[in-house]
Image (tube, grey):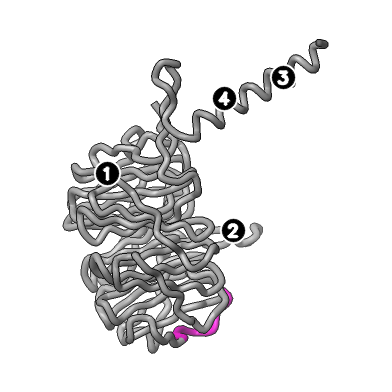
Amino acid sequence: MDKRKLKWLWCIVAVMAFCTSCAGPSDTSTGGPQFTFVTHRGLLAVCAPDAKNVWVAGYSGIIFHSGDGGATWQQQVSPIETDLYAVWFADASNGWIAGKAGTVLHTVDGGSTWQKVSAPTEERLFSICFVDADTGWVAGPNGTILHTADRGKTWVKQGPESDYIYNSIFFINKSSGWVVGEFGTILHTTDGGTNWVQQECRDIVPVVSAKEWESPTPSLYDICFVSPEKGWAVGLDGIIIATDDGGATWSQLKSGVNLNLYSLAVKDDAAWVVGDRGGYIVAENYGALWTPQDESIKTKFWLRDIAFADKQHGWVVGSMGTIARTVDAGKTWDILSGIKVQ
């Protein structure tokens, strides 16, 4: 056998060994790494209405549920095979999922059955938010904001005409809500979405000289409020911005990273953010100081969503079926699914 053929043979053997190791826990007698997977597909959304119940969703219509805090997982039957971007549960029974091509799914039995709901759009729906079992909103590209007041049976369009991508929508109550998206877009409503007013964080608006081409304002990917006055948003290049007056003014905070930050969770006075390459940042005392925690979540893949049931119990999902769990307020994380970096 010549050297070229021998080289290719060794490459094939190496690839087969890697794929075998990724299929599930490896044989401990080999001394190799052990990988456990609930799914190999990328996960884009997680929701935990309580410490025991958690739902994850992602590419190709995948939905999984755990009713015992992550000890076991059951795949739920999805009526579609398109990508799912956001999941929201009001309690352990009533939930919604938003996804590609205007997809909205609804369950009243904890996901034992999911029904597709008709929505007046074919746009991707990146974000979903309900304030109770009846009242909710979804958002997506081309200025898409849809509202329901009857548990998702019917949806109506809201918001101004726009070609902007809206990445996240959040309502603190039935009246007061925000949308964030590309080019630093921030919109606010005080009447349930009938009217929207533009807000702006001057700290992230590019400063250029007259001789330079103007660059776009960095995109914002997620937003969360703990009261009608106090909230945060995260986005491109490690951006974290905060407001104490309902968004009338926004200020940039030091995140300590330049990674894209995709998702934000807040409980009580603590906050957590995740993003690219296993990026993870925490804050106490209502976000006064943000600190990167590079080694807390043992992965270098992108992390797309984070959710906390209470201040102690939290979940993160991301690339390659990654599911991570904390039971100590985010100080330590266990990788329940995915490739763990030692």
Q: Which residue is mark 2?
A: 209
Q: CA distance from mark 3 to mark 2?
A: 57 Å
Q: Quadrant of residue 147?
A: bottom left
Label 3 sits on a secondary structure element that is helix
Assign a secondary structure to mark 1.
Answer: loop
**Residue drawn at (49%, 61%) of the image:** 61
Mark nearest the camera among 3 and 2 is: 3
Mark closest to the chain's N terminus, 4 or 2: 4
| Residue 342: in magenta span | no
**In this rendering, is residue 166 above or below 258?**
below
> What's under tag 4, amino acid-wise?
Ala
The residue that appears at 39% across and 20% down in the rendered structure is: 28
Q: Quadrant of the N terminus?
A: top right
Q: Are marks 3 and 2 in contact (CB under 8 Å)?
A: no
Report the amino acid beneath label 3: Leu
**Lower sequence index among marks 3 and 1:** 3
Pick the front one: 301 or 176:
301
Kind of element beneath mark 2? loop
Residue 17 has which mark?
A: 4
The kind of residue on which mark 1 rests is Ala
Q: Amino acid at mark 2?
A: Ser
Q: Please report the residue visible at 26 percent of the width from the left and 73 percent of the height from the top.
A: 172
Residue at image mark 1: 71
Residue at 30%, 37% in the rendered image: 334
Q: Nearer the viewer, mark 4 or mark 2?
A: 4
Extent of the magenta region:
157-163
The CA span between labels 3 and 4 is 12 Å
- Of the numbered discs 3 and 2, the one sitting upstream in the chain is 3
- Res 243 seen here: no
